[in-house]
Image: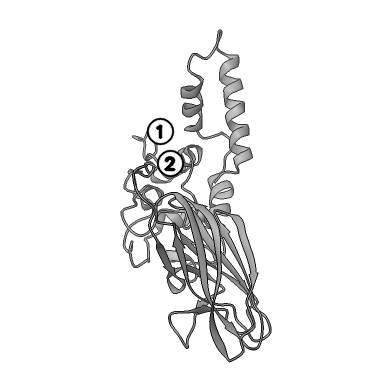
Amino acid sequence: MIGLPRVGARAALAALALALGAGCPGRIEDPIAFREEAARRCPTNYDVERDLFARTCATLGCHTGGAALAAAGLDLQTAGIAERLRSHVSASMQCGGRAAIVAGDTESSLLWQKVGEPPPCGDRMPSAQPPLNPTELACLRQYVAALAGDASDGGAPPPPPPPPPDAGMTPTAVTIEAEEMTLSGYVVDPLDAALIRLPEGVPSGTATASFTGVAGSYRLWVFVVAESDGQPRLTIRVAGAEVAAQTYPLALTDMEPETLGPFTVTLAPGDAIELTGEADAGAWARVDRLEIRP
């Protein structure tokens, strides 16, 4: 769901540093602390609905399409976002009944709680994306406090990011079942619920999951199903970077299991693993699972 472009964040930070430095004689005694404090302030020209929601929340398959189609019934795309948030109660299975904005209470507002680690219910937001950075958190908190009318919120520090994994932990194998990934365009195969496929007439789709293992170097395999009437294509990305783009082999019989990989990848907890499938003729880019091994 719920990044300020990195270039924008750096520019805002540099401007803040120049503005503060111009009014203070001498030099900054602790530049690291200065930068950290500056990053926790929201730039005056930052628009949460435009710069945060539109880029990380109002994406295909998430908080778009009106209340009937949007995740948890929350549309963060069309006009009137603030009004909707003030009255929105989550319709998701995990968070159902919780108010997005609690009057006078920023901390109890689900919109703020969902960006923390861990959230009180469901997955952390934005889904399958890195956690919000300190500047984004500061802007979101300011936005939520304004909607809640929380006069007592004096800009308390946002929730800390999740701690780094223990260096002593040993990477172990991780299996991701395709039908448990977040699907856009893809659907669970009606003929085999252990597979995903593109519906007839849909040229492409994505399946995304967050890595939950220990940071380290891994080998990644993708188990797919080849078909006799076409050769689909599958592109694999990790944390937004393309790892490989592979064409399925042509099956000799109707459908045959095949394996793509291994591909060497470096993973950290929370990294998004994304598969983009492209159909070919009557073959629908079926995927079974991913296996990730140290």
Please name the residue shown 63% across and 88% down the image: 228
Residue 27 marker: none
Alpha carbon distance from label 2 to label 1:
8 Å
Relative depth, front residue between 65 and 276 = 276
Q: Position of residue 275 (x, y in %)?
A: 56, 66
Q: Position of residue 154 (x, y in %)?
A: 38, 32
> Do the residues bearing badges 2 and 1 touch, measured as CB atoms within 8 Å?
yes
| Secondary element type, mark 2 | helix
| Secondary element type, mark 1 | loop
Q: Position of residue 94 (x, y in %)?
A: 33, 64
- 236 to 42, vertically: above or below: below
Give the quarter of the figure containing the C terminus.
bottom left
Relative depth, front residue between 40 and 181 = 181
Residue 155 marker: 1
- 46 to 217, vertically: above or below: above
Residue lying farthest to the right in this orientation: 281
In the image: residue 5, left or right of residue 135: right
Amino acid type of the residue tagged 2 in the rendering: Arg
Amino acid type of the residue tagged 1 in the rendering: Gly
Residue that mark 2 sits on: 141
